[in-house]
Image: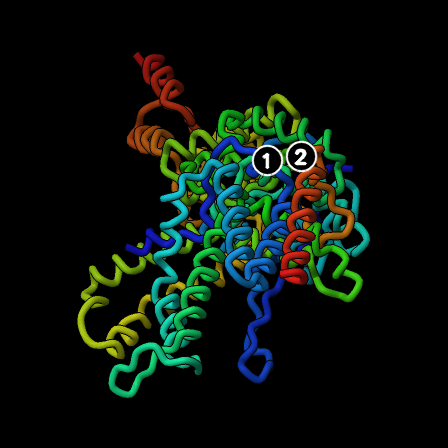
């Protein structure tokens, strides 16, 4: 069985008027199927309102589905008894770094998760040290989070999740509020965790450049998974992506336009180097 | 302007008092406050002064830093002193128009002022030598017995420490909203009190909305990290009494005995 498996997952937000009568139903997830293996780096791509954040909250059982089934680490999320086990194994990082840091000292914040799941004191110290090291924030362990930059705060949040030693980490637009520098810091840290520790990563984003690092991409639109595959196969379909109001990375777009105007360049160019190589091969 | 507000300011220094267990310090402050409001006469006054002076000296916090805290209570101090001065009946010293100043009034005004000043100085040694986190940790553990009568001690301690963490964030946000509203022509400075109060509405509404949004996000983040209340939680930095803490308890108890003896005998 896959690490995460979803079958026909449905989530409906029910809008009510002031008397509590149902005004309308918004279907945020509409029959989503997912198959994610242990150790994969998955990106979930989608425009605003595509249901990607709702999906993220399901993976951590912060939301319960209205229909369909979801297994995380072989456990059914609809069973109340599994909730804490799943949360322990599927950590979550949110968009706003300020709103997820609980303590006023970096190391105490990282310790918050392990404290909650009842890890003994000596072990907490080890885990805090290891996870701060793995995101490169160990030198800030005694600082106040308020004095850190956005990228640093987000790396502290990732360390806080890592200290619980989850098998999987779900990042819900972790870079949306960061500058390009902070974005790179955070993604490098995430990639390192995936490659070195074998943590399954599910990165929810709408930045195309971040998707290139993933093993596989799911594209969502209006609550449905509309495309899936490797970043290269997804980005070869520039016109379809555009119809979902998504932009491809600039390099890919340039290559696509060159190809359309008659140059013999393969589809799905992802990096500048690839484009340079393809162009050199022409002459 | 708004950034000058500091609550529970901590003064980092390497002193015995800084290293004490917060529970010891809480206990000490309670005893100190009791002694402050029960002493009588010049000898009691000397004893309390001595205790305060010793506390400040050992804490290594500069005295002028402590005096800063007194600025906030100047008005309360003056009002209290006035009430005591003019409204205490007794032997008249001076009469100005219809107001009489009595000997007893003068005495109680002076002592009341001293008590208030000592109260602020004494309690600020606690906050200046203890980080907010240690303080809430100490309170959580010291008040744990109240759990039996269904007081949510852990939850209250958690709320306080989260509030302390969010004060600087909300202050920054207030600053930001203020600037944004000023840029759109809002006027927070001019006009009378009512006008100024009305001008605060466009500041407070966005601030409240954002505070609620933050609270919602934080609750989700805490839940995602398996927060499930105080039961079954371990601590990264558990409180443990050291030798210095036991000695301090003895010193504080000794002080309490002397205070009681003086009150009874003198």
The C terminus of chain A appears in which quarter of the rendering? top left
- Chain of the residue under label 2: B
Query: Does A167 sit left or right of B97 as displayed?
Result: right
Report crowding for label 1: few under 14, some 14 to 19, many 20 or more residues within 10 A (C-alpha).
Answer: some
Q: Residue B61 carries which label?
A: none
> In which quadrant of the rendered image does the N terminus of chain A lie?
top right
Q: What element carries label 1?
A: helix
Q: Mark 2 points at which residue?
A: B244
Q: Mark 1 lies on which chain?
A: B
Q: Which of B176 and A283 is in front in this view?
A: B176
Disc 2 on helix, strand or loop? helix
| Residue at the spot 33% in from the left edge and 13% down from the top edge | A280
Tell which residue pokes out farthest to the bottom in this image: B98
Q: How crowded is mark 2: few (under 14 residues within 10 Å), some or many (20 or more)?
A: some
Verify CB contact (< 8 Å) between mark 1 and mark 2: yes
Q: Quadrant of residue A148?
A: top left
In the image, is residue A256 above or below residue B161? Answer: above
Where is residue B128? Give x, y as percent: 48, 45
Query: In the rendered image of this protein, does residue A282 appear above or below residue B67?
Result: above
Report which quarter residue A129 is drawn in. top right
* Residue holding disc 1: B19
């Amino acid at each position: 069985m896959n690490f995460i498996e979803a079958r026909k997952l449905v989530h409906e937000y029910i809008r009510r008027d002031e008397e509590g009568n149902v005004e309308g139903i918004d279907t945020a997830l509409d029959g989503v199927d997912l198959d994610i293996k242990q150790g994969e780096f998955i990106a979930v791509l989608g425009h605003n309102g595509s249901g990607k954040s709702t999906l993220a909250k399901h993976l951590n059982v912060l939301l319960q589905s209205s229909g369909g089934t979801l297994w995380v680490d072989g456990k059914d999320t609809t069973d109340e008894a599994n909730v804490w086990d799943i949360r322990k194994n599927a950590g979550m990082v949110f968009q706003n770094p300020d709103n997820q840091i609980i303590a006023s000292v970096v190391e105490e914040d990282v310790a918050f998760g392990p404290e909650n799941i009842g890890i003994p004191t000596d072990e907490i110290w080890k885990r805090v040290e290891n996870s701060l090291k793995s995101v490169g924030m160990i030198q800030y362990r005694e600082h106040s989070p308020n004095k850190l930059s956005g990228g640093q705060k987000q790396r502290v949040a990732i360390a806080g999740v890592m200290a619980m030693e989850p098998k999987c980490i779900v990042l819900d637009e972790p870079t949306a509020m960061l500058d390009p520098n902070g974005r790179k810091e955070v993604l490098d840290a995430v990639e390192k965790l995936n490659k070195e520790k074998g943590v399954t990563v599910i990165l929810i984003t709408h930045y195309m450049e971040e998707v290139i690092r993933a093993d596989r991409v799911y594209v969502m639109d209006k609550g449905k998974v509309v495309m899936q595959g490797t970043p290269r196969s997804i980005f070869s379909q520039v016109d379809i992506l555009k119809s979902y109001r998504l932009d491809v990375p600039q390099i890919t777009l340039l290559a696509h336009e060159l190809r359309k105007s008659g140059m013999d360049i393969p589809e799905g160019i992802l990096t500048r180097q690839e484009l340079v190589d393809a162009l050199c091969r022409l002459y | 302007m708004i950034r000058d507000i500091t609550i529970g300011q901590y003064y980092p220094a390497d002193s015995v008092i800084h290293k004490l267990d917060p529970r010891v310090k809480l206990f000490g402050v309670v005893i100190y406050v009791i002694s402050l409001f029960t002493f009588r006469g010049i000898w009691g006054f000397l004893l309390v002064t001595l205790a305060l002076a010793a506390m400040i000296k050992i804490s290594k916090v500069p005295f002028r830093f402590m005096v800063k805290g007194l600025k906030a209570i100047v008005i309360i101090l003056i009002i209290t002193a006035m009430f005591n001065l003019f409204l205490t009946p007794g032997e008249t010293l001076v009469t100005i128009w219809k107001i009489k100043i009595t000997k007893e009034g003068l005495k109680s005004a002076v002592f009341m002022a001293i008590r208030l000043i000592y109260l602020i100085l004494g309690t600020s040694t606690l906050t200046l030598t203890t980080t907010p986190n240690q303080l809430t940790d100490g309170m959580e553990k010291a008040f744990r017995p109240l759990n039996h009568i269904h007081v949510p001690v852990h939850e209250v301690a958690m709320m306080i420490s989260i509030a302390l963490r969010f004060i600087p964030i909300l202050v920054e946000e207030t600053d930001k909203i203020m600037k944004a509203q000023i840029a759109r022509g809002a006027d927070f400075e001019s006009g009378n009190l009512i006008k100024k109060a009305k001008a605060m509405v466009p500041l407070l509404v966005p601030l409240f909305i954002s505070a609620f949004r933050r609270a919602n996000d934080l609750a989700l983040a805490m839940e995602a990290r398996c927060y499930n209340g105080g039961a079954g939680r371990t601590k990264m930095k558990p409180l443990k009494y050291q030798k210095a803490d036991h000695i301090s308890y003895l010193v504080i108890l000794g002080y309490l005995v002397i205070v009681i003896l003086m009150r009874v005998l003198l």
